[in-house]
Image: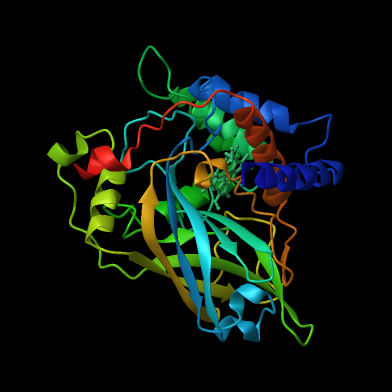
Amino acid sequence: MAAVAGVAAIDVGGFAYAGGWLRPDTLIPAQFADRFEQIAGHHDGFRRNHAKGLAATGTFASNGAAADICHAAVFAKGTLPVDARFSLSGGAPDQADKPATVRGLAVQYQLPNGEQWRSPMINTPVFVDSTPQGFYERILAAKTQPQTGKPDPAAMSAFLARHPETVAAQRIIAQQPPTSGFADSTFWGLNAFRMTNSAGVTAPVRWMLVPQQQPGQPVGDAAKSDPNYLFDALIKAMERGPQAWTLKIVVGAPEDPTNDATKPWPADRRTIDAGTLTIEAVHTEAPGNARDINFDPLVLPRGIAPSDDPLLAARSAVYARSFARRAAEPKQPSAVNVEAAAR
Ligand code: HEM
């Protein structure tokens, strides 16, 4: 699995690079990977971003409804296996869980025809950057200063003054505070894609996973003193039974922006409930499970294609660089251990 994932990722990353999204005279994938290390330190064997995580397995049951807009085999009626990974953003694999840290859920759908669809999502309704350069600059401006334990306010103010799109996105995100845990989080794919149906009609789309679980109880400060409280709560929830999300596909209108993940689409757009993602088990990260997948957002089945969003090719190229580095390094145990949490 690791070898297969790596080869696919590096091919796609090379194509993206050649496509000119990350021009050699401006920003290259290695600089991006270096920047994550500059902020969070170097941690052998871990992802350069979303380093702290928990592997998972389950199924996707398609109800056939999305076949109306997309001929990808994932949307034919039926059930297929998925590998998934829950994570927290940031390059430190041992960071303490915090309510406001961005949560990730990445899913790899294994289609019956041998194709794969890899879809990494986060728990915010828009992204805070519209360009790779913005992301690259923002994460440095947000770096915790050793003297204060906080970001340098002057650096962040200067960044925000140059990036009104980030200010606008942060306002939208502030209206939807994070839920109590992973199990009751919505996860958004954020970037626009293009889906084509069997009649050859193509439409812009975005998607999200909406939890079928009821909202959890607010977590008290005592529980939050557990540095793994978010992951431990998910492991405990899994002991009670599978956790499920509805995959919703939002169909854009021609005037909706496809090249800017900071901008929401109008709320009245057609939304298709495509089926149910069920997480049936969680696993400590280990060889051969989701630890060794590169959740490259450009690994897509026929029927789904990238949009003109410049983040997509940049993500693909940088994830490949992160994967190549971590695959060549000695592996360290994950801070999230299913057996220890279940005790
Ligand atoms: C230019 C923008 C971005 C850059 C440079 C970036 C960079 C990265 C890197 C380096 C990784 C680790 C890859 C690996 O080693 O496997 C990663 C993981 C991840 N990213 Fe991004 N990212 C970007 C935008 C986004 C966006 C827009 C989303 C949400 C839709 C997102 C969601 C995730 C998730 C969920 C993971 C963890 C996937 C896993 O569990 O393997 N990222 N990102």
Image position of 208 with respect to 21: above or below? below
- In this rendered view, identify the residue nearer to me: 164 or 113: 113
Can residue 165 be seen by looking at this rendering?
Answer: yes
Q: Tell me which residue sits at (67%, 42%) in the image.
A: 3
| Residue 136 image position (x, y, % from top left) | 62, 33
User: Which residue lies at the image location 52% right of the left edge and 65% below the top edge?
Assistant: 81
The x and y percentages for residue 63 are 51, 83
Q: Where is residue 271 in the image (x, y as percent from the top left)?
A: 52, 79
Q: Quadrant of ligand 1?
A: top right
Q: Residue at x 66, y 46 (%)?
A: 5
Q: Image quadrant of residue 138?
A: top right
Above-or-below relation of 291 to 59: above
Question: Is 79 in front, or is 52?
Answer: 79
The x and y percentages for residue 177 are 33, 53
Q: In this view, does 311 lie to the left or right of 151?
A: right
Q: How many marks?
A: 0
Instruction: Specify the quadrant that holds the C terminus.
Output: top left
Front-most of residues 305 and 164: 305
